[in-house]
């Protein structure tokens, strides 16, 4: 299946470079581009991309606000693409907020071309792009320094079984499904089943939001 991609960046040369790289892949098709968040919403409605590569800082409407609109569309809008944030900074408050809103991860703009291609495929497959240690550090840093939310996030974890809580903790520590399976002496398919139940019970979209909640709830302590 071809992955439909929308590229959003205020620099035309960046958009052109990313488009040329991605269009050279047999399984990826760049269906549109936009110079700011407002344009991105319009192009997304017309082209229905699977993945949106979203720059963080842009004029008129920044990437965070655009991501919120795309990931929490108004009633009647069925299409909801996955969003991969692009940034030049390895620690960025905007990116943390985007992950909380449901973005599937983030990628540094100067990452190697192979990483960009891989990131699009990973996100399109429904996984979160959280393998780089910098991503986990970003989430931990901002979870530690942000004011407590109005509603205690720990209450959301009450519906999890002890095993599901263990799995969530290991997800937040950055372990892959295979590593979790080895740690808990489970089949990898069983781990996938637990993760699906965790996301459903907590009304989370993917691992990115699960990791944020694990930090905010105190299940995992920043720096631990």
Image (spheres, rainbow, N blue to C red):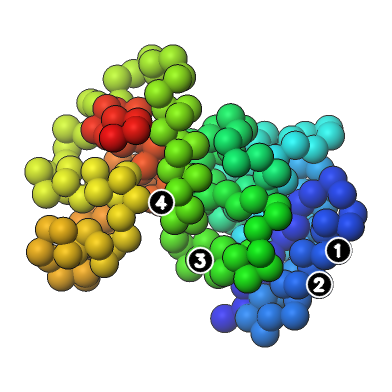
Contact (CB < 8 A) between labels 3 and 1? no
Q: Which residue is mark 3?
A: 122
x, y (%) of residue 98? 56, 38
| Disc 3 secondary structure class | helix
Q: Which residue is mark 4?
A: 206
x, y (%) of residue 51? 62, 60
Contact (CB < 8 A) between labels 4 and 2? no
Measure the C-alpha gap from mark 4 to mark 2: 29 Å
Measure the C-alpha gap from mark 2 to mark 3: 19 Å
Contact (CB < 8 A) between labels 2 and 1? yes
| Disc 4 secondary structure class | loop
Check residue 20 in the rendering and tell me which mark sits there, or answer none: 2
Mark found first going from the N terminus, 3 or 4: 3
Front in this rendered view, residue 201 or 164:
164
Q: Residues within 10 Å of mark 2 (few under 14, many from 20)?
A: few
Q: Residues within 10 Å of mark 4 (few under 14, many from 20)?
A: many
Check residue 16 in the rendering and tell me which mark sits there, or answer none: 1
Q: Residue at x 82, y 52 (%)?
A: 34
Measure the C-alpha gap from mark 3 to mark 4: 12 Å
Measure the C-alpha gap from mark 3 to mark 1: 22 Å
Q: Is residue 146 visible?
A: yes
x, y (%) of residue 109? 70, 52
Q: Residue at x 24, y 33 (%)?
A: 219
Q: Residues within 10 Å of mark 3 (few under 14, many from 20)?
A: some
Q: Which numbered mark, 4 or 1, is in the foreground of this view? A: 1
Residue 41 position (above or below residue 64):
below
Q: Residue at x 41, y 51 (%)?
A: 206
Measure the C-alpha gap from mark 2 to mark 1: 6 Å
Q: Which numbered mark, 4 or 2, is in the foreground of this view? A: 2
Location of the C terminus by quadrant is top left
Mark found first going from the N terminus, 3 or 1: 1
């Amino acid at each position: 299946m071809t992955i439909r991609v929308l590229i959003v960046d205020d620099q035309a040369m960046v958009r052109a470079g990313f488009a040329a790289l991605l269009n050279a892949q047999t399984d990826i098709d760049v269906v549109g581009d936009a110079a700011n968040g407002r344009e991105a919403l319009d192009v997304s409605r017309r082209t229905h991309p699977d993945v949106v590569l979203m720059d963080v800082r842009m004029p008129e409407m920044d990437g965070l606000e655009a991501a919120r609109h795309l990931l929490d569309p108004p009633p009647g809008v069925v299409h909801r693409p996955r969003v991969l944030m692009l940034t030049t900074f390895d620690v960025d408050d905007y990116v943390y907020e985007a992950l909380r809103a449901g973005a599937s991860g983030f990628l540094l703009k100067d990452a190697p071309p192979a990483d960009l291609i891989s990131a699009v495929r990973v996100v399109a497959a429904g996984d979160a792009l959280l393998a780089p240690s910098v991503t986990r550090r970003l989430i931990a840093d901002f979870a530690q320094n942000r004011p407590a939310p109005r509603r205690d996030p720990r209450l959301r974890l009450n519906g999890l079984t002890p095993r599901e809580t263990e799995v969530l903790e290991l997800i937040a520590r950055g372990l892959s499904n295979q590593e979790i399976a080895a740690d808990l002496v489970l089949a990898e398919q069983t781990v996938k089943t637990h993760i699906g139940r965790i996301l459903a019970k907590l009304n989370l979209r993917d691992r990115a939001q699960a990791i944020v909640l694990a930090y905010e709830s105190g299940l995992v302590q920043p720096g631990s």
